[in-house]
Image (tube, coloured by chain):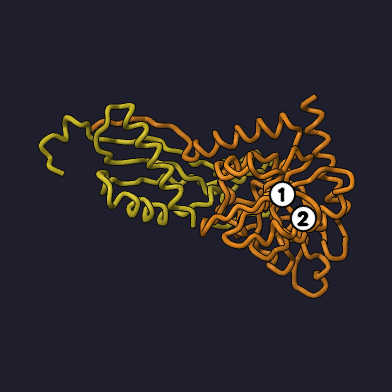
Chain colours: A yellow, B orange
Amino acid sequence: MHELSIATSIYDACQATMRQHGGGRLEVVRVAVGELAALEPDLLRFAWDALLAASEDRGCALEVEWRPARQRCVACDEEKPRAPGSWLRLCPDCGEPLSLEGGDELEILQLSCTGPDEEEGGGT
Amino acid sequence: MTEVDVRQRILAANEAAAAALRAGFRRDGTLVLNLISSPGSGKTTLLEATVARLKGRLKLAGIEGDIATERDAERLRRLGIPASQILTGGACHLDARQILGVLPAAGLGTPDILFIENVGNLICPTSYDLGEDFKVVALSVTEGDDKPFKYPAIFARAAVAVITKADLLPHVPFDLAAVREQISALNPAGHIVVLSAMSGDGMDAWCSLLEERLASKRAERA
C-alpha cells in the first residue's frame, strides 16, 4: 500500500539528480528492490506510471531489479536453494539453523535522460 | 541519451530525518521502540500493561500513529504519561519526518523510554526508520502461526518479537515452536517474548528486557 510514497521518493531523488545534470527529460530509471523491502514490483511500476502521468516525464520506464534474500547454512558453508516466496526453517541437509543475507535493497541504481539540447524541437 | 549512476537509497530523505531523531534521542538518553503489528494484535494493551508496571520507576511517553481518532493517545494519557497522536489520514505507516514534526510541541519531555506505536500494518511500516533503537513486532496467537513466513520483512528486521494474548493459547491452534523456528530462520539474533497483557504472564521478562536495553544504551553513551 505504500508503493505510491516509494514511487514519489524515487521521482523526487531523480529530479534532484537531473537538476544537478542540467535538466532534461527522464527516459528510464533503474532501481533495486530486495525481497525484504516490503514492496511489490508490479504495484511500484503501476504507482510510478500514475505518478508521472501528468508530468513532463510521462512514459519514463521504471525498471525493477529484484534482489532475493539468501538463506545460508554456516555448517555446510553454502547457500541453500528454496522456492520463490517460501522459506526454509532449518538447513534441509544438516538441520542446522540458517542465516539470512541480503534482500533489504531499496536503491536507485541508474537513470537515463535526454538532455535539454536533444529535446529541442521535440514539441512535447 | 545520458546515463547517470545514482546509487542512492530510495528512502534517503527519511533516513536523514531518522538520523537526526536518533542523534537527539541519544543525547537525551531516551530508549525508543518502534512497535509494529497488524491491527488488533494488542499493541496498545501491551503498552498499557507496560506503563502500569514501569511508570513508578521510569519516565515514559508515547507517540501513537493511527489513520483516525485520538483514542490510543487518550488511553496512554489516562495512565498518566504524556502521549502524542499522529493522524496519518489514510497513510499506512509513520515516517521520520512526521515524528520530527510533532516532537517540538508534543510535550513529551525527555522520557527514559519513548514508545512509538505505528499504524496497524505488518508491511509498510517496516521500511521506514523512525530513529528508534529497535523495532518490536507483536503477533497475537489468534492471528495464526504462519505469519512470520508470510510477512518476512518485519520479522527479519524486528530485534524483538512479542507473542501476545498468550492466555488464549489453550483455545487456539497456534504452534508456538513453529513460530519460534520461523522467526529464528528470518532473524537468528532476534529475541522472542511470549506474554499476556491480561494475565500478566511474561510481562516481567518484557519489562526486564526494556530496562536492560535502556541501561546498555546509557552505558554506551557514558
Q: Which amino acid does label 2 sit on?
A: Leu
Residue that label 1 marks:
B62
Q: In which quarter of the image is the N terminus of chain B?
A: top left
Contact flag, marks 1 and 2 (Cβ < 8 Å): yes
Q: Residue at x 78, y 27 (%)?
A: B220
| Furthest residue toward top | B222
Res B45 visible: yes
Dot 1 falls on a residue whose secondary structure is strand
Q: In which quarter of the image is residue B47?
A: bottom right
Q: Which of B199 and B142 is in front in this view?
A: B199
Location of mark 2 (residue): B47
Circle 2: element type: helix
Foreground: disc 1 or disc 2: 1
Please tell me how crowded label 1 is: few (under 14), some (14-19), or many (20+) other residues with Cα within 10 Å: many
Callout 2 environment at 10 Å: few (<14), some (14 to 19), or many (20+)? some
Q: Position of residue A2 (x, y in %)?
A: 49, 53
Q: In which chain is the residue bearing label 1?
A: B
Position of B37 with respect to A17 (left or right) is right
Task: Give the residue type that dot 1 points to.
Answer: Gly
Q: Quadrant of residue B197?
A: bottom right
Label tally = 2
| Image side of residue B8 versus residue B144, left or right | left
Q: Residue at x 77, y 40 (%)?
A: B111
Q: Where is residue A93 in the image (x, y as percent from the top left)?
A: 67, 50
Give me the disc on residue B211: none
Dot 2: chain letter: B
Q: Position of residue B222 (x, y in %)?
A: 80, 24
- The residue at the point 32 percent across, 30 percent down is A19
